[in-house]
Amino acid sequence: MPKAVAVVVGATGGIGGALCEELVQGSDFDTVIRLSRPSLNFCDEASIAQAAADLPSGCVRLVINAAGFLHDATTQPEKRLRDLDPTTLAHYFNLNAIGPALLMKHFFPLLPREGRAVVASLSARVGSIEDNRLGGWYGYRSSKAALNQFVRTAAVELARTHPEAMCVALHPGTVATDLSNPFVRGNKALHAPIDAARHLLAVIAALKPENSGGFFDWRGELIPW
C-alpha cells in the first residue's frame, strides 16, 4: 500500500515549522515533506513544477501552504490609497495568490483519485470582504481575497475528479511569528505557533468533502467571504 505523504510549503516559517513538528509526531503520515525558499519560489513556476515532480504521485494526502507575505524591511502594509505602489501590489499578489494558485495547479495531480486528501492554504480573516470594517492593508487584504477565490474555484474543479478530496482556506488566528509580531503588541489572544498548528490540524482532521471550497478559522468556524 502506498505510503501517505504530507507536504508543508513555507516550512521554515513559524507556523509552517510548527505544522511539520506536529505532523512528524503524529501517526497519520509516513512521510512529511518540508518545502520552502529558495528551492520552491512562488515567483518561479518552474521551481513549483519541479517540487511537484520530485514527489510520489498518488501518495500525497495532505498539502498545507503556510507561506505568505505581509511585510519586510522595505515594505509595510498600506494605510491609505496614496500609499499604493504597483510593484508592491504585484509582489503581494505573487506571493499570496498567484504562487499558491500555481501550487494547486501542479500539486492537485499528485493527489490520489480515491480516499481522503486535503489541500489547505493559510489565508487571513482580513481577506474577508464582508468582514472588512477597518480598511487599510490594501495589498495584503486584496491578495488574500484573491487567494480565497482561487481556493473556491479550484475546489469546484477538484471535486469533478477527486470526490473525496478537499481544498480549503484556513485562518490560523493571530500567531506570534515574524509575520505578525510588529502588529500585535498587547494582543492577549495571541497564539503560539505550536498551538496554532494543533488548532489547524484539528480543523483539517474534521473536514468533510462537503466542506471543500470553504474558508474556516482556527476553531473550524466559517468566515464570510
Image (cartoon, rainbow, N blue to C red):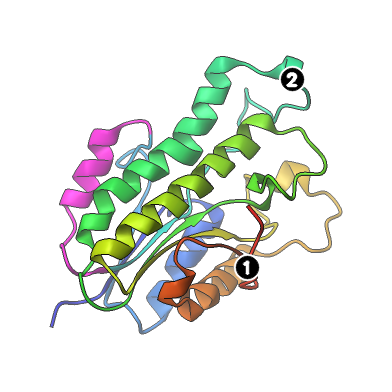
Q: Tag 2: residue type?
A: Leu
Residue 166 at x, y = what percent? 39, 67
Q: Residue at x 47, y 79 (%)?
A: 205
Report the side of 162 relative to 182 (left or right): left
Q: Residue at x 38, y 37 (%)?
A: 42
Amino acid identity at mark 1: Trp
Quickly name the residue at label 1: 218
| Foreground label between 1 and 2 | 2
Q: How many other residues sit within 10 Å of disc 2, few (<14), some (14-19) or many (≥20)?
A: few
Residue 71 shown left or right of residue 201 in the figure: right
Q: Which residues are magenta?
A: 43-60
Q: Position of residue 179 (x, y in %)?
A: 62, 44
Residue 186 shows up from this direction: yes
Residue at image coords 37%, 52%? 154
206 or 184, which is in the foreground?
A: 206
* 193 within the magenta span: no
Vertical position of residue 109 compared to residue 97: above or below: below
Residue 97: image x %, image y %?
47, 39
Disc 1 crowd, CA 10 A, few/some/many (<14, 14-19, 20+): many
Q: Of helix, strand and loop, which one carries label 1? A: loop
Left or right? Give the position of 40 relative to 178. Answer: left
Can you give x and y, in whole percent of width and height, for residue 20 in the image?
43, 66
Q: Is residue 175 left or right of residue 18?
A: right
Whether residue 162 is situated above or below residue 182 in the rendered picture: below
Disc 2 secondary structure class: helix
Q: Which is nearer the eye, 100 or 71? A: 100
Between discs 1 and 2, the one toward the N terminus: 2
Image mark for residue 48: none
Q: Do we see residue 71 in this rendering?
A: no
**Quadrant containing the N terminus in the rendered view:** bottom left
Residue of label 2: 81
| Residue farthest right in this picture | 186
